[in-house]
């Protein structure tokens, strides 16, 4: 290497070291050859701790896993979509790849959402020389986005999933149940004589009643995959994946018990307290059937429960 090239290389290394963008570079064997000061500030990991090693993953994760640059070095770019929350569609690596992901950042003791760009550097002969990875902290932006999405998906009064979310969940779980040949159950829940309750106690008290019933419904389900939604007005709905009619009945019994424990006085009810009626439908989706058929069956069962005296549930016939 002549003097000019040596000086140019030294200048490039110093320039990268002082870039305000967190950046590190791996050689063709995956060793860290540059870890700039901005990267130190972002990760809490000093250059001396990673330079010349393949231990840079420790800056981002608490267990070994490849960084974006590693996947390019190792020719494993096809694995990027499985390892990153969001990434470009892979067509060519000539201009690099963009991805983003939550990183646990062990040295900082907090989780960050990082936008990541990695690009290969090739020699004149086409041989891979290095991969450059740059990082941007997008945590505040991501959390704000998640908060907005949560607001859009949740009912403002009860905090449950709203009707739009319910529709999305039902379609998704229906498709999954059909694919896996598993049962899907739906429970429609309606507060008995709620109009009378509002007329007697006022709308603010009615709102509090809705909130308490929503809490009781959530307490009646134990699995993270179960969805409790406010369907509209005083009506709620529960989506219970991999649940047959017998198990759905157990959930309905828990709901009845939970609402009964609230002991909310209701002078306009034949039971003297707030109660709910429920319609249950469960089936393994078959060809030609739709999620709407499950919803219609549960709604018809709810109507039956109301006309049977309320404060109970009815089970829809096995759907065909």
Image (cartoon, grey):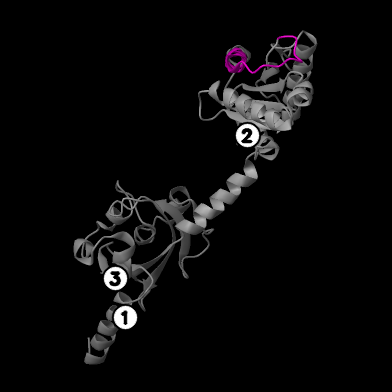
Q: Residue at x 61, y 46 (%)?
A: 151
Judge from the rendering whether residue 111 lies leftward or rightward of residue 63; answer left or right. right
Q: Quadrant of residue 125?
A: bottom left
Taking the magenta stretch, the answer to whether it contains residue 11 is no
Where disc 3 sits, the SS reads helix
The residue tagged 2 is 158
Residue 76 percent location from the top left of the image? 40, 55
Frontmost of labels 3 and 1 is 3
Taking the magenta stretch, the answer to whether it contains residue 255 is yes
Q: Residues within 10 Å of mark 1 (few under 14, many from 20)?
A: few
Query: Where is 282 relative to 47, above or below?
Result: above
Where disc 1 sits, the SS reads helix
Residue 55 percent location from the top left of the image? 24, 56
Q: CA distance from mark 1 to mark 2?
A: 54 Å
Instruction: Please tell me the numbered disc located at residue 4.
Output: none
Q: CA distance from mark 3 to mark 2?
A: 47 Å
Q: Which residues are magenta?
A: 253-271
Q: Residues within 10 Å of mark 3 (few under 14, many from 20)?
A: many
């Amino acid at each position: 290497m002549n003097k000019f090239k040596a000086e140019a290389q030294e200048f490039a290394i110093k320039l990268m070291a002082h870039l305000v963008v967190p950046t590190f570079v791996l050689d063709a064997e995956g060793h860290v050859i540059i870890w700039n000061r901005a990267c130190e500030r972002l990760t809490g990991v000093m250059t001396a701790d990673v330079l010349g090693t393949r231990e840079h993953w420790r800056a981002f994760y608490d267990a070994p896993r490849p960084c974006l640059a590693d996947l390019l070095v190792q020719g494993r770019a096809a694995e990027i979509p499985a390892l990153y929350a969001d990434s470009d569609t892979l067509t060519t690596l000539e201009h690099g790849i963009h991805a983003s992901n939550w990183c646990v950042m062990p040295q900082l003791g907090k989780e960050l959402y990082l936008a990541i760009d990695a690009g290969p550097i090739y020699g004149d002969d086409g041989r891979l020389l290095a991969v450059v990875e740059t990082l941007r902290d997008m945590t505040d932006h991501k959390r704000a986005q998640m908060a907005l999405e949560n607001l859009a998906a949740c009912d403002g009064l009860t905090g449950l999933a709203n009707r739009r979310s319910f529709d999305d969940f039902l379609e998704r779980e229906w498709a999954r149940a059909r694919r896996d040949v598993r049962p899907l159950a739906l429970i429609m829940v309606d507060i008995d004589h709620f109009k009378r309750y509002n007329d007697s106690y006022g709308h603010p008290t009615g709102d509090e009643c809705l909130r308490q019933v929503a809490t009781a419904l959530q307490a009646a389900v134990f699995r993270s995959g179960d969805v409790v939604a406010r369907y509209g007005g005083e009506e709620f709905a529960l989506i219970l994946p991999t649940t047959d009619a017998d198990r759905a009945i157990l959930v309905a019994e828990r709901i009845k018990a939970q609402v009964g424990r609230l002991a909310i006085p209701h002078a306009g009810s034949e039971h003297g307290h707030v109660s709910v009626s429920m319609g249950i439908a469960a089936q393994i989706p078959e060809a030609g059937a739709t999620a709407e058929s499950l919803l219609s069956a549960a709604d018809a069962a709810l109507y039956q429960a109301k006309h049977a005296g309320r404060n109970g549930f009815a089970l829809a016939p096995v759907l065909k």
